Image (cartoon, coloured by chain):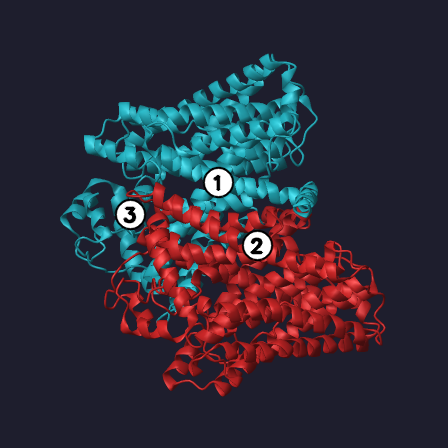
Chain colours: A red, B cyan
Amino acid sequence: MDQMYSFVQMKLQNLATSDHASVVSMNLFVALLCACIVIGHLLEESRWMNESITALVIGVTTGVVILLISGGKSSHLLVFSEDLFFIYLLPPIIFNAGFQVKKKQFFRNFITIILFGAVGTLISWTIISFGAIQFFKNLDIGSLDIGDYLAIGTIFAATDSVCTLQVLNQDETPLLYSLVFGEGVVNDATSVVLFNAIQSFDLTHLNTSTAFHFLGNFFYLFLTSTLLGVLTGLLSAYIIKKLYFGRHSTDREVALMMLMAYLSYMLAELFYLSGILTVFFCGIVMSHYTWHNVTESSRVTTKHAFATLSFVAEIFIFLYVGMDALDIEKWQFVSDSPGTSVAVSSVLMVLVMVGRAAFVFPLSFLSNLAKKSQTEKISIQEQVVIWWSGLMRGAVSMALAYNQFTRSGHTQLRGNAIMITSTITVVLFSTVVFGLMTKPLIRILLPQPKHTTSATASDPNTPKSLTVSLLGSAQDSFDFGASDVPRPSSIRALLTTPTHTVHYYWRKFDNAVMRPMFGGRGFVPFVPGSPTERSIRE
Amino acid sequence: MDQMYSFVQMKLQNLATSDHASVVSMNLFVALLCACIVIGHLLEESRWMNESITALVIGVTTGVVILLISGGKSSHLLVFSEDLFFIYLLPPIIFNAGFQVKKKQFFRNFITIILFGAVGTLISWTIISFGAIQFFKNLDIGSLDIGDYLAIGTIFAATDSVCTLQVLNQDETPLLYSLVFGEGVVNDATSVVLFNAIQSFDLTHLNTSTAFHFLGNFFYLFLTSTLLGVLTGLLSAYIIKKLYFGRHSTDREVALMMLMAYLSYMLAELFYLSGILTVFFCGIVMSHYTWHNVTESSRVTTKHAFATLSFVAEIFIFLYVGMDALDIEKWQFVSDSPGTSVAVSSVLMVLVMVGRAAFVFPLSFLSNLAKKSQTEKISIQEQVVIWWSGLMRGAVSMALAYNQFTRSGHTQLRGNAIMITSTITVVLFSTVVFGLMTKPLIRILLPQPKHTTSATASDPNTPKSLTVSLLGSAQDSFDFGASDVPRPSSIRALLTTPTHTVHYYWRKFDNAVMRPMFGGRGFVPFVPGSPTERSIRE
């Protein structure tokens, strides 16, 4: 017994070594992830909560506990690392979004999405940057130069697409989902491009030529990133179609799809492009071609494995952000003047709201002008929901703020510390408050048939269209009229808007050129009762 | 055009920064992984090659190319990191092995496996350690103390279970597979326990009490590790059964299974147990209970996702080891006296062969004594295959060698450098030569019916029983006689050996106590044509 005791004591002493400390924190982190999943499941009946908020709350609670145990020294298990976020956590989330997105909806609203995501973000950025310059002058927050202000604009113009995914439902409000989420992806890309531009451009000599150079840079990045994603996706489809014809191996197919998707992201990073855009379009192409070239078990596996990876990465991020919220090093600077910090956070929050309002309503008006059919226009209620559900700020804002205002996670400047704490405040406040109120708001503004509402209440945990049966959601795209004889519904659709004409020609091109080369579903007739049938009803 | 050129030039300059260097190496690494999969697929018709050797060859080739490009400075993209190996790459491989292993075969041979894995490894370790002490005296290899020699014994007593998986086929030679692979897992655990014991015990005062303490420590570790794995597995089954009853969410189930499996490994590391044993038994319990509590799409997803993760981790390891083989820092020490290095490697290789022969044949004889039926005995041909296919040394040996003879990957001592290069030599030689010759050897020693042989030749790429159809292999355990009325075949089986009596009581206990609590398949009748049917034929 004594020997046992001394053994345990020896083990406990070993615990103090730094190598073992990381094992302890990993254990705690994995256990917390499990707890988030279980608690999130128990709370799924709730009308207000969602998984992000649960993870955020658990993260903050753990942070408080760690802070108390460590005697006020530290509150997190791991220091917020941009690398971890941008290299490991973000790619699976965005790829899965592209993989599961309803492509028909997405491309039908393509122009509106680009308008919101690119032009809208620029408007929002301008308002937040200049607003910050105006208001922060009167507040005593240390020295910030013009680059810092422009960076603040970018940081707070970045909508959190991860949080959006949790709040909106693809099956319930498909138009809103595709608009807000599509905007989020383009917006992320715009923010990253803007941010890199601000860090690399010489901002002391702003003139028209710089502006044009900047604009050219933006379009170049947008187009090349998209192209890279599409090419990688097509390459994966081609390789799997050529090599695996006749003899399939599920493991190899799944591994190859996963690795190629990740490769597209890393290639974009290699060429200083927007990895987010690349991996998103790679996901779209893979679900349109590659996914149909593999065995059925590979299809089920990829669909759910990608969704699971994305799900875990999301919870990881929110847990992480929650734990990092009590970053004691930065809060110490703020504790001298709590008023300043509150003022800065409030100003930023108001600027975010104004900045978003300044582009959602005008651009929706513009977009409505182009649409002939009344049902396709964005109603004023929908505009309010779009405005509201894009107000959340998340991990992208955190990562950009840490990049701009700290050196590998640490800072000694008061102004920088205040900006970090304000970012944390805005992220927590917007995620919790706006996140909690989005579902009720949608219920008030956009009343749904009774059964749909109850279906939503029981499935808020499956945001990425996982309510769809086994093989449903990745198959629904380009489905209507996939056979050569167009159905009545698709003929009617062809006559309404020019987008449908584009779609018609795309379909012809797809059937004639792309599918013979890259595979894909081809001319498969509808089997009644199969998951694809549901796309007819859309 | 000029602007474009200067732009490209600016990008190229940025490439030189260290942050971007890691992006470049990650790109190259992911691309190489893809290449390994594609080339491995193209070579799958080959009778000699397997995926490990392909990855190893590609790794060495890339190492040579990098060495030439960098002008002889460096040959790897990443320095071999034990953490990467033990924390991220090994767990999925061992977990998947437990998840996919044929449990009936494994438990039927349980005693033999333990005998081989624990007693056998100790015999092998003793012979290699004392052999090294004897032979290395005469070679000029710098100062090695008694701890170093005992460590050498452990390093080279560690069979590479990853490589074994690639070479033997679970469906073709089930007895050999379960023996060699089961031994590999227990052996890994024994090696790690031995290694930790050697590093922590005071070796200057070796006496009987130390030996008993050591033996007690070993049994304590073995039992607690197994228990921890079983408990974590049961906990996961219980949580999923309780919480998800009636309303399933595939993402959550898959995420929870993945995280709980990983948690079991990390918990074992936390308590200084053998993570390998823990995660292996966790995999067995999960496939027996948890797996049957989830939806069908979760089953397909977990089965293939775990196999894919394991597959990618395996290729990753071999690629990594291959690239690390040209570790220029260590080879420089050796280049002065190439003869010594060749001598050391040869001595080690011979010791490995003798050490393994010294336990395989005697222990097989012992095991045969306990068996009554002639068909269950291990024939002399099978003994030769067991001896041969366990001669490969792999990543575990590399990781232990780096741990013992370097400090975070570097060393300036000549003796240490020679030990690293000798380990690399033994690993490369044994994997390539023994790996290449195992398949032909099995074909010569154990002739199979013609059609089985041809089936093997076309599917060597699916080592982990993936040739079995969709849901086959994880379901086959405990299947015969799963209904309450024992079939004739199972009655006959009951009468043959005492192992079957243990199995009979276990089945009763499982049905009466475990299954009502933790789920599992229960009394499901056989559906003709379903994947479970195949287990009757076994």
Label 2 sits on residue: A275
Q: Is residue B271 left or right of residue B57?
A: right
User: What x and y, as percent, mark residue B142?
Assistant: 67, 19
* Residue annotated with mark 3: B502
Quick check: B136 above or below B189?
A: above
Q: Nearer the viewer, residue B364 or A65?
A: A65
> Which mark's residue is nearer the viewer, 3 or 1?
1
User: In the rendering, which numbered label is found on residue B33?
Assistant: 1
The chain ID associated with circle 3 is B
Q: Position of residue A263 (x, y in %)?
A: 52, 47
Query: Are discs 3 and 1 both within one chain?
Result: yes
Tell me if mark 2 has few (under 14), some (14-19) or many (20+) residues whose alpha carbon lies within 10 angstroms of its own.
many
Please determine if labels 2 and 1 lie on a single subunit.
no
Mark toward the viewer: 2 or 1? 2
Identify the element where label 3 is drawn. Answer: helix
Whether residues under marks 3 and 1 lie with C-beta atoms below 8 angstroms apart, the answer is: no
